[in-house]
């Protein structure tokens, strides 16, 4: 019985990873039309995006079309020229140019978009994502 | 047959017990699902009740400390926030994974954090929060009543309890408490363990029952078969015994008939022997009567010689009469054992056959070196001896042996009759004791030796055997020494 629970938990965690990956694919995939999306990643999201087929993970911001920034202090790269998507609330607050964020809070997925960041890089959200735009 | 491993009584007791157990187990099993959900409900209920109390206190505390101006007061005082968050932290246990206070943003379905009792994964003050099951959260704002709901999709959460903070009759915030899935899992794993044990126990019980059932059936079958076999063997034995008895009875009857037959044959011979015995005395009587007749005709009948002759005739008649008695005695069917010796036997047999054998120019030699007294069927043994003498006489007469003799010896418990007739041919020597075996075409019944064997071996408990020596056959009767 205990074994079954272990299995369940394992399944849930695997599922969560898959869920996270799907989320990245849906969000970023709907904003960036080219395939693969060349992406610079720091933090936890790196492995997830490397697993995905629609992303091409690169090591510098230079050729990337989007930077996915997580909780990583070593990522003090100059990525001011490309749109930034953050994967922690802290980074979302810190990087004011970031156009959006995805992170977990109290076990719930939190998705945010910021009007300012979107406008800066002329990014367009699909209809179903527009409700995640922060007010004011 | 009670020797199988259950007596009938304990067997029934066993059956009844097992059936009761199975029924009981089935009942438990059937009610288990219900019981399990009952336990779950109960746990949930007690949890909710408990959390209700806690949150009541918390609401009271928050209301008091914020002076019924929740958001404004919190915005103003970081210290108060810290203080209240410490209070929330106190309730955060393994059970309650998250405990926090949120406020709904006007005109949206988004919330923001006011207080968070977390150490890790801590939200910032006024941080935007997008809960799942948004309808439930909105409902709390509408009804101003606490509510809870279970999670389907959130990792590690079981259920969420929402408590409205009401100030001035308006919901100004929600205390949210997320129950850890561990709690639920723990409860369920216990219940599942229990149900698993019940299932195992039941299966085991059923299995044992079935095994015992099978074994007892096999055992019963085995016992039944054994019984049947024993019965069959018994029946068979009975029929066998019956058959044997029947056969023995038949044989006895046959023997009796054969003996009767041979006796009849001997009777016939007896006439011949009587004739031999009587010839001489009758001749003598005849001579005496002739003498008497002549003396009467010559008128020389004097009383003295008349009496003499009459006496002699009387004597002779006496002799004839004795002969008849002898014969009658000889063939008398005495069923009783008598004390006798070989000497007696030989003497009384020769009294009968002596004359007729002697008339045939056969010398009879006797050599008696035994004075053992046997307690046995003397008359029958006399017939045996008679048979042996007659057989010897037959062969001597048939072969016209010169200087023929029959030698009768008695040494200790052996009685030997030998002749010089050349012996029994080797090819038939095995068969001469068989009934109806005879080489004599005219007058042989083939019963003489068979009868003799029957008498010696079956009646008197001895043995009779035949060998050939240089001159002729040697018959040897051995009686058990007394
Ligand atoms: N002393 C003997 N010498 C040689 N053969 C013998 C002698 N006694 C018996 N036999 C053989 O054994 C046979 C069987 O003898 P048994 O007395 O049983 O019958 P039997 O003499 O032929 O007939 P019955 O006795 O009725 O006259 C005889 O026919 C004879 O061939
Ligand atoms: Mg004979």
Image (cartoon, coloured by chain):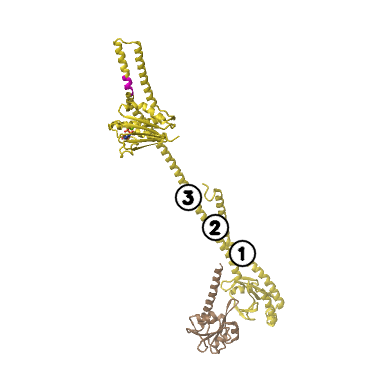
Chain colours: A brown, B yellow
Q: Of the residues tagged 3 and 2, which is closer to the observer?
A: 3
Classify 10 Å Cα crowding around label 3: few (below 14), some (14-19), many (20 and above). Answer: few
Query: Which quadrant of the view contains residue B306?
Result: top left
> Residue at 52% across / 79% down in the picture?
A21
Which mark, by number, is residue B181? Answer: none
Tell me which chain the residue with mark 3 is part of.
B
Residue B106 in sight from this viewpoint: no
The foreground one among B438 and B429 is: B429
Q: Residues within 10 Å of mark 1 (few under 14, many from 20)?
A: some
Question: Counting residues from the N terminus, which is met first, the one under dot 3 or under dot 2?
Answer: 2
Instruction: Tell me the SS state at disc 3.
Output: helix
Tell me what residue is drawn at x 69 percent, y 72 percent: B56
| The C terminus of chain B: image quadrant | top left
Q: Callout 1: residue from which chain?
A: B
Q: Is residue B388 above or below residue A124?
A: above
Q: Is mark 2 within 8 Å of ligand 1?
A: no
Q: Main secondary structure of the magenta part?
A: helix
Q: Is residue A4 highlighted in magenta?
A: no
Question: Which residues, given as a range, are shown in magenta?
Answer: B277-283
Callout 2 secondary element = helix
**Image location of residue A66, percent across then percent down:** 52, 86
Residue that label 1 marks: B39
Percent position of residue B179, x then y: 62, 72
Mark linked to residue B222: 3
Give the residue at mark 2.
Answer: B205
Q: Earlier in the sequence, mark 1 or mark 2?
A: 1
**Between disc 3 and disc 1, whose residue precedes?**
1
Callouts 3 and 2 in the same chain: yes
């Amino acid at each position: 019985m205990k074994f079954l629970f272990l299995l369940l938990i394992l399944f849930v965690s695997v599922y969560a990873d898959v869920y996270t990956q799907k989320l990245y694919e849906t969000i970023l995939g709907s904003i960036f039309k080219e395939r693969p999306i060349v992406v610079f990643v720091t933090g936890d999201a790196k492995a997830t995006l490397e697993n995905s087929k629609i992303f091409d993970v690169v090591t510098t911001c230079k050729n990337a079309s989007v930077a996915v920034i997580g909780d990583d202090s070593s990522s003090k790269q100059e990525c001011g020229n490309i749109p930034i998507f953050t994967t922690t609330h802290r980074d979302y607050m810190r990087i004011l140019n970031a156009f959006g964020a995805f992170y977990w809070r109290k076990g719930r997925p939190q998705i945010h978009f910021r009007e300012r960041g979107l406008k800066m890089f002329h990014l367009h959200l699909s209809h179903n994502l527009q409700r995640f735009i922060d007010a004011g | 047959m009670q020797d199988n491993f259950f007596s009938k009584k304990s067997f029934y007791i066993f059956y009844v017990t097992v059936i009761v157990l199975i029924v009981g187990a089935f009942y438990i099993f059937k009610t288990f699902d219900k019981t399990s959900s009952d336990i779950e409900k109960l746990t949930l209920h007690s949890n909710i009740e408990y959390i209700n109390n806690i949150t009541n206190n918390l609401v009271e505390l928050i209301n008091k400390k914020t002076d019924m101006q929740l958001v404004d007061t919190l915005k103003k005082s970081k210290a108060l926030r810290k203080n209240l968050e410490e209070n929330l932290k106190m309730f955060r246990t393994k059970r309650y994974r998250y405990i926090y206070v949120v406020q709904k943003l006007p005109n949206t379905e988004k919330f923001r954090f006011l207080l968070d009792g977390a150490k890790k994964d801590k939200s910032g003050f006024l941080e935007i929060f997008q809960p799942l099951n948004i309808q439930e959260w909105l409902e709390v704002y509408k009804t101003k009543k606490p509510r809870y709901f279970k999670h389907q999709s959130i990792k590690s959460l079981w259920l969420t309890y929402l408590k409205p903070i009401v100030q001035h009759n308006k919901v100004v915030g929600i205390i949210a408490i997320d129950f850890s899935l561990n709690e639920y899992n723990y409860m369920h794993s216990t219940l599942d363990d229990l149900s698993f044990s019940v299932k195992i126990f039941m299966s085991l019980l059923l299995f044992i029952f079935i095994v015992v059932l099978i074994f007892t059936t096999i055992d019963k079958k085995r016992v039944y078969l054994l019984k049947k076999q024993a019965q069959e063997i018994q029946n068979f034995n009975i029929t066998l015994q019956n058959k044997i008895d029947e056969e023995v009875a038949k044989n006895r009857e046959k023997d009796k008939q054969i003996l009767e037959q041979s006796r009849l044959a001997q009777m016939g011979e007896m006439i011949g022997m009587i004739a031999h015995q009587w010839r001489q005395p009758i001749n003598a009587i005849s001579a005496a009567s002739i003498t008497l007749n002549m003396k009467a005709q010559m008128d020389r009948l004097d009383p003295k010689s008349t009496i003499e002759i009459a006496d002699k005739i009387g004597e002779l008649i006496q002799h004839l009469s004795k002969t008849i008695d002898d014969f009658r005695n000889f063939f008398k069917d005495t069923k009783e054992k008598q004390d006798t010796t070989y000497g007696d036997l030989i003497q009384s047999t020769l009294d009968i056959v002596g004359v007729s054998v002697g008339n045939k120019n056969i010398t009879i030699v006797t050599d008696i070196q035994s004075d053992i007294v046997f307690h046995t069927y003397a008359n029958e043994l006399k017939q045996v001896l008679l048979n042996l003498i007659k057989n010897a006489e037959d062969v001597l007469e048939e072969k016209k042996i010169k200087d023929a003799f029959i030698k009768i010896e008695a040494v200790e418990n052996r009685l030997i009759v030998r002749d010089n007739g050349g012996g029994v041919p080797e090819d038939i020597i095995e068969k001469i004791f068989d009934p109806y075996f005879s080489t004599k075409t005219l007058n042989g019944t083939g019963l003489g030796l068979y009868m003799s064997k029957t008498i010696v071996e079956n009646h008197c408990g001895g043995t009779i055997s035949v060998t050939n020596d240089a001159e002729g056959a040697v018959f040897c009767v051995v009686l058990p020494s007394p």
